[in-house]
Image (spheres, rainbow, N blue to C red):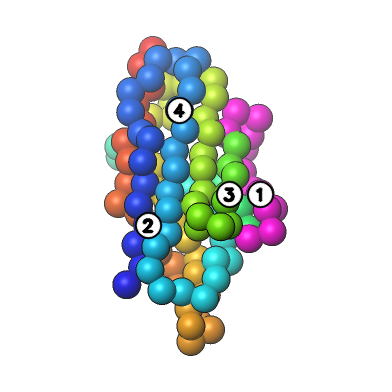
Amino acid sequence: QVQLVESGGGLVQAGGSLRLSCTASGIFFSINTMGWYRQAPGKTRELVGTITSVGSTNYADSVKDRFTISGDNAKNTVYLEMNSLKPDDTAVYYCNANLEMLSRWSNDYWGQGTQVTVSS
């Protein structure tokens, strides 16, 4: 049973910063990618950014130069450092992991989501 546990959401004023973390636990062979998605009220879930096991990153245009994804392979953990936050960043942020299982099949897993609210 694989679990993704997120932490670090909260309420912050515009221009402020927050750091989210997500740790994968359970039985799997390796991590292919981990990343973050977000869903604002009334909107579809959208990509924030991803990081591969070798550290290659990919970001949505809306967060480039403000958000940074990093990973700690030894801890199976991914971080999202969010700076210069805007009210438009308000959403539930979901951690995603694409894991290679012992069977060598790859599966996607999702965290429970953490609320980020940016006040103006």
Give the alpha-carbon distance from disc 4 to disc 1, as whole Å. 19 Å
First of labels 4, 3 by sequence position = 4
**Nearer to me, 106 or 2:** 2
Q: Say what secondary structure mark 1 lies in.
A: strand
Give the alpha-carbon distance from disc 1 to disc 2, as whole Å. 20 Å
Q: Position of residue 2 (x, y in %)?
A: 36, 68
Residue 13 visible? The answer is: yes
Q: Say what secondary structure mark 4 lies in.
A: strand
Q: The C terminus appears in which quarter of the rendering?
A: top left
Query: Which numbered disc covers residue 57?
Result: 1
Q: Which residue is mark 3?
A: 71
Q: Say what secondary structure mark 3 lies in.
A: strand
Q: Which residue is mark 2?
A: 4
Tell me whether the residue at label 2 lies in contact with that at label 3, contact meaning CB atoms closer than 8 angstroms: no
Q: Which residues are magenta?
A: 53-67
Q: Is residue 104 above or below residue 45?
A: below
Amino acid type at mark 1: Thr
Residue 47 visible? The answer is: no
Report the residue at 44% width, 67% height from top.
108
Give the alpha-carbon distance from disc 2 to disc 3, as whole Å. 14 Å
Depth check, mark 4 against mark 1: the one in front is 4
First of labels 1, 2 by sequence position = 2
Q: Say what secondary structure mark 2 lies in.
A: strand
